[in-house]
C-alpha cells in the first residue's frame, strides 16, 4: 500500500533524472566553439538592434485575470460533479445558482468588450 | 524515521527554502519561479498528508493560475532587476507582518494542546470532500461565486484604464 | 515482511523504468511516423536514408541532437534558459503517470496494474500538470533574449491558459457520469458504452481545447514559422531543443491516451486483448492529429482567442447544464 502511494514520487524522481541526464549529456558531448555572432539572438539574419525586451500589452494581463477567475469556477464545479448523482435535485439547483452568477459575470465581461481581441 | 517522515521533511525544507529565495531574489522572474516551486512542493505536501484533492487545487490555482498572472504582470512592467535596495516603507510593513505571523505560528505550534499529537495519515477521497463541501458549506460556495464576480469587475476596471493610458503612450 | 516490501519496491522500479523507456521510444518513433505520413500525404517519400524505410531516423536524430553545440544566446537569463525545456519535457512525462493502458496482468503470482499510479484525483493531476507546463513555454521564450522567442512564449502562454478553461469545463460531464476522477474508474464506467456516444459535445470540445493546449496545427501560433521564426524555441539547440521536441510528441501520445480514456472507453473492447485495444485507439487519434496537420491552415490569433472565449466556453457551460438535467430526468 505504502509503495503504491509512493509510486508517483518515485516516478517523479526517475523523470527528473532523465531530464537532467539529457541536458547534461548534451552539455558534455556537444562541441563548444562560441563566437559573438553565433550567440547573437536570431533576427532573420540581420544584425540585432535594440533591446529584445518588449513590454507586453495589458490585454494579456486581462486574459490571465479572466483565466484565474474562470479556473476557480471550474475547480468549484469538480467536487460538485463527483457527488452530483448522490445529491440530485439539491446539487442541480445549487449549481444552477452558481453557474447563473458565473453567466452574469460572463455576459458582463463580454458586453464590456474584454473578450474582443483587436 | 519512517519514509513518510523523511519525505515530509524534504518537501517542507523545499517549501521553506524556495519561499525564502523568492523573498530575497532581486530578479523578479526568479522570484516568480521560486514561488512556483514553493506552491508545487506545498501541493505534494498536501498529497502526502492524505488530501489529494487539495493538492491538485493548490497546484491548479496557486502554481498554475495565480503565478501565470504574476508572470504576465512582471512581463508587462519593465523586467530589469532594480539596483535600489527598496525603501524602508516597503520593508517595514513586511517585516512587521512577518514577525506577527511567526509569533502566531509559534503560539499555534507550542501552546495549542492538540498540535503536539502526530496526525495519523488519513485519506480524504474526492467524493468525501465533495459531500462534505455540499452538505456543510454549500452557502459559502455560492458566496464565493459572488466574490469572483466582484473580482472580475475589478480586474476589468483596472485593465481598461491601463489600456487607455498605454495607447496614449504609444502615440 | 521486509523481503516482501523490497520485492514490491524492485517490481515498481522495473515497471516504471520499462514504461518510461517504451514511452520515450514510441515518442521518438512518432517523429518518424509523422514525417513519413506527411511525406506520403504530400506525395513525397519522407525520411528514407537512415536504415530501411528510414527506420533508423530517430536514432540518427538522437545522436545529432546530443552532439550538437549547446548554444546560449548572449544576455540570456542562463538559469531559466536551462530550466524551461526541462519543465516542458518533465511535465509531459509526468502526466503519463496516471494514464491506464490496460486492465492489469498477473506475473509470478503478483498482480500488476497497468498504470503507473491510479491517483483518485487523476483527472485533476492532468489539469494541474498541464497548467504548470505553461511556464516552460513562457519562461523559455522570455529567457532567450530574442524578440521572436518572447512573442512566441507570450502567445503560447496566453493560448494555453485560454484553452485550459474550456478543457476543464468539457471534462465536468465526464466526471458527472463516472462519479470519479480516477482514470481507471472513468474507463470502467465505460465498459458498456463509451462516453463518446453519450457526450459527443464534450468530446468535440475536449478535442479542440486539447489541440490548442498542445499547440498543434491549426493552433500552432506560438511557433508560426512565417512570423516568428520558430517561436519560443528559436534560440534553443542540442538536447534542450530535443526536450521541447520530445515534450511535444509525448503530449501527442498523452492526448491520444486521454481521449481514449475519457471518451473511447480506454482498454475496453471485444475480442482483442485490452492493451491492443488501447494502443489501437491511441493510434487512431494520433493519426488523426497528423492528418489535421497535413490538412488545416493555421488560424489567426484573434480567431483563436474568440473561439476559446466566445464559442467553446458558452457551449461547455450549456453542455454541463443539459447533462445535469438529463441525468436528473433519467434517474
Image (tube, coloured by chain):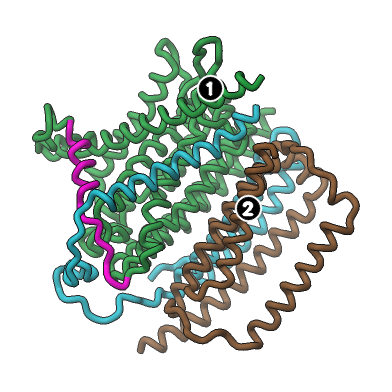
Q: Colour of chain B?
A: brown
Q: Colour of chain A?
A: cyan
Work out whether residue C196 can be spotted: no
Disc 2: which residue: B42
Q: Residue at x 31, y 52 (%)?
A: C240
In the drawing, does residue A26 fall left or right of residue A59?
Answer: left
In the drawing, does residue C48 fall left or right of residue B79?
Answer: left
Query: What's the chain of the residue with tag 1?
Result: C
Location of residue C192 in the rendering, given as x and y in whole percent from the top left corner: 54, 19
CA–CA distance in space, label 2 to label 1: 28 Å
Foreground mark, 2 or 1? 2
State how many labels appear: 2
Q: Colour of chain C?
A: green
For the residue carrying disc 1, how many other residues have a C-alpha within 10 Å: few (<14), some (14-19), or many (20+)? Answer: some
Disc 1: which residue: C113
Magenta-colored stretch includes residue B102: no
Say yes or no: labels 2 and 1 on the same chain: no
Q: Quarter of the image for the N terminus of chain C: give it.
A: top right
Location of residue C260 in the rendering, given as x and y in whole percent from the top left corner: 44, 30
Decide which of A53, C160 is in the foreground and name it: A53
- SS label for mark 2: helix
- SS label for mark 1: loop
Residue A51 — which label? none
Query: What's the chain of the residue with tag 2?
Result: B
Write the start and end of the magenta stretch as one range: C56-75
Q: Residue at x 66, y 55 (%)?
A: A100
Q: Residue at x 65, y 27 (%)?
A: A1
Work out whether residue C329 can be spotted: yes
Location of residue B90 with respect to C136 vertically, above or below: below
Amino acid at each position: 500500500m505504502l509503495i503504491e502511494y509512493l509510486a508517483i514520487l518515485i516516478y517523479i524522481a526517475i523523470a527528473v533524472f532523465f531530464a537532467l541526464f539529457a541536458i547534461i549529456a548534451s552539455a558534455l558531448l556537444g562541441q563548444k566553439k562560441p563566437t559573438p555572432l553565433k550567440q547573437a539572438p536570431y533576427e532573420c539574419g540581420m544584425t540585432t538592434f535594440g533591446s529584445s525586451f518588449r513590454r507586453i500589452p495589458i490585454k494579456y494581463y486581462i486574459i490571465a485575470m479572466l483565466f484565474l477567475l474562470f479556473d476557480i469556477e471550474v475547480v468549484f464545479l469538480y467536487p460538485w460533479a463527483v457527488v452530483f448523482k448522490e445529491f440530485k435535485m439539491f446539487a442541480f439547483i445549487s449549481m444552477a445558482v452558481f453557474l447563473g452568477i458565473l453567466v452574469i459575470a460572463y455576459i458582463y465581461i463580454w458586453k464590456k468588450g474584454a473578450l474582443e481581441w483587436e | 524515521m519512517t519514509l513518510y517522515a523523511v519525505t515530509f521533511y524534504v518537501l517542507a525544507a523545499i517549501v521553506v527554502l524556495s519561499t525564502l529565495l523568492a523573498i530575497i531574489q532581486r530578479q523578479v522572474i526568479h522570484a516568480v519561479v521560486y514561488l512556483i516551486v514553493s506552491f508545487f512542493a506545498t501541493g505534494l505536501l498536501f498529497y502526502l498528508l492524505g488530501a489529494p484533492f487539495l493538492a491538485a487545487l493548490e497546484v491548479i490555482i496557486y502554481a498554475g493560475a495565480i503565478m501565470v498572472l504574476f508572470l504576465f504582470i512582471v512581463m508587462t512592467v519593465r523586467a530589469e532587476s532594480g539596483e535600489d535596495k527598496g525603501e524602508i516603507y516597503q520593508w517595514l510593513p513586511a517585516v512587521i507582518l512577518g514577525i506577527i505571523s511567526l509569533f502566531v505560528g509559534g503560539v499555534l505550534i507550542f501552546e495549542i494542546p492538540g498540535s503536539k499529537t502526530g496526525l495519523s495519515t488519513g485519506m480524504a477521497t474526492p467524493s468525501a470532500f465533495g459531500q462534505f463541501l455540499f452538505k456543510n458549506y454549500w452557502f459559502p460556495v455560492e458566496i464565493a461565486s459572488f466574490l469572483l464576480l466582484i473580482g472580475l469587475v475589478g480586474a476589468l476596471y483596472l485593465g481598461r484604464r491601463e489600456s487607455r493610458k498605454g495607447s496614449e503612450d504609444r502615440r | 515482511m521486509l523481503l516482501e516490501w523490497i520485492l514490491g519496491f524492485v517490481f515498481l522500479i522495473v515497471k516504471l523504468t520499462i514504461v518510461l523507456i517504451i514511452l520515450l521510444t514510441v515518442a521518438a518513433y512518432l517523429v518518424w511516423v509523422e514525417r513519413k505520413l506527411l511525406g506520403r500525404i504530400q506525395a513525397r517519400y519522407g525520411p528514407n536514408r537512415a536504415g530501411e524505410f528510414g527506420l533508423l531516423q530517430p536514432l540518427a536524430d538522437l545522436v545529432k541532437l546530443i552532439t550538437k553545440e549547446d548554444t546560449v544566446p548572449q544576455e540570456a537569463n542562463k538559469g531559466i534558459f536551462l530550466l524551461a525545456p526541462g519543465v516542458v519535457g518533465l511535465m509531459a512525462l509526468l502526466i503519463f503517470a496516471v494514464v491506464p493502458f490496460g486492465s492489469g496482468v498477473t506475473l509470478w503470482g503478483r498482480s500488476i496494474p497497468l498504470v503507473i499510479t491510479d491517483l483518485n484525483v487523476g483527472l485533476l493531476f492532468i489539469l494541474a500538470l498541464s497548467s504548470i507546463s505553461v511556464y516552460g513555454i513562457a519562461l523559455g521564450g522570455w529567457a532567450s533574449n530574442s524578440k521572436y522567442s518572447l512573442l512566441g512564449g507570450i502567445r503560447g502562454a496566453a493560448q494555453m491558459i485560454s484553452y485550459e478553461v474550456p478543457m476543464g469545463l468539457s471534462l465536468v460531464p465526464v466526471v458527472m457520469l463516472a462519479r470519479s476522477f480516477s482514470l481507471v474508474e472513468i474507463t470502467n464506467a465505460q465498459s458498456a458504452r463509451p462516453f463518446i456516444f453519450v457526450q459527443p459535445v464534450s468530446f468535440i470540445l475536449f478535442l479542440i481545447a486539447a489541440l490548442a493546449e498542445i499547440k498543434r496545427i491549426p493552433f500552432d501560433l506560438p511557433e508560426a514559422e512565417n512570423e516568428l521564426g520558430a517561436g519560443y524555441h528559436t534560440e534553443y539547440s542540442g538536447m534542450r531543443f530535443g526536450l521541447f521536441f520530445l515534450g511535444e510528441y509525448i503530449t501527442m501520445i498523452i492526448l491520444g491516451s486521454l481521449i481514449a480514456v475519457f471518451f473511447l472507453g480506454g482498454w475496453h473492447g471485444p475480442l482483442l486483448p485490452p492493451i491492443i485495444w488501447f494502443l489501437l485507439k491511441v493510434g487512431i487519434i494520433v493519426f488523426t492529429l497528423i492528418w489535421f496537420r497535413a490538412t488545416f491552415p493555421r488560424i489567426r490569433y484573434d480567431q483563436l482567442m474568440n473561439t476559446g472565449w466566445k464559442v467553446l466556453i458558452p457551449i461547455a457551460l450549456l453542455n454541463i447544464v443539459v447533462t445535469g438535467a438529463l441525468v436528473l430526468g433519467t434517474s
